[in-house]
Amino acid sequence: MSLIDNTYFQDSNIVANINEPDPNAKTDNVLGLKIIKGERDVLSFAFGFEMWEDFKQYITNGIDGNTPGNYLEIINGKTYTIQGKKHYWEGLILPETKESLLADYVYCTYHDDNQTQTTGIGEVAVDNKVGNRVSMTSKMTKVWNRFIEKLHGGFRSHPSGFTIEGNPFWYLPGGGVDYYGINRKSGNVSLVQFLFDNKSDYPLLDTNYRRFGEFKNELGL
């Protein structure tokens, strides 16, 4: 069981045909696998492998009653203060409004993989039962950028280069070099910033630089 389910795919994240009669439950099964894989991909990136392995035991059958408080703060959100400034992490899931950065990611990967299907004559457009097919690039770009904003929001993005050892560095506008690349914000913060801001609470967190997608323009590039 994952933190999100099919009910998170509505409004701007709607998945067509999810509630239509489907004898083989193909849409439901494909989406279910996408949810499992998406959750793993996103959280193992944000946490690092060791912390992800520790975290996932508490969400195998819903949110475990013995889930540590620091993990619950990742799931449900937290408000904290740094240098007199309020920071707000909204959480991985918002059950009341059915919003989640995980759902945003799964929505994009689902539609990216299911705009065509393989047949005996090659790749053909998937036949939607209701409505006409239109380009989804603009909509998917908006959802993708919303996901990236919630995941890392440009925090430690776009390094200027890498050292011989493979570590990233950033040139500073006024001169000098930054080897941490922390573009800290106040107010609403991304998951990655929340983890770095509170890394003393997460001893298993992997703070090495990793890249997982960037913002896209309206053309999806």
Image (cartoon, helix red, strand yellow):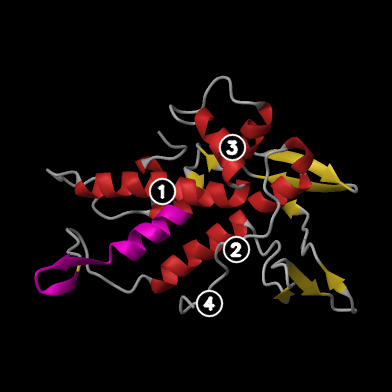
Work out how far the residue at label 3 is from the one at label 1, CA to CA, in angstroms.
Answer: 18 Å
Amino acid on which the number 1 mark rests in the picture: Lys
User: Would you place residue 26 above or below residue 77 in this image?
Assistant: below
User: Would you place residue 167 above or below residue 121 in this image?
Assistant: above
Labelled pair 1, 4 in contact (Cβ < 8 Å): no
Work out how far the residue at label 3 is from the one at label 2, CA to CA, in angstroms.
Answer: 22 Å
- Nearer to us of marks 2 and 4 is 2
Residues in magenta? 105-124
Q: Earlier in the sequence, mark 2 or mark 4?
A: 2
Helix, strand or loop at disc 1? Answer: helix
Helix, strand or loop at disc 2? Answer: loop
Q: Earlier in the sequence, mark 3 or mark 2?
A: 3
Work out how far the residue at label 2 is from the one at label 1, CA to CA, in angstroms.
Answer: 18 Å
Q: Which residue is mark 3?
A: 75
Amino acid on which the number 2 mark rests in the picture: Arg
- Nearer to us of marks 3 and 2 is 2
Q: Residue at x 67, y 48 (%)?
A: 206
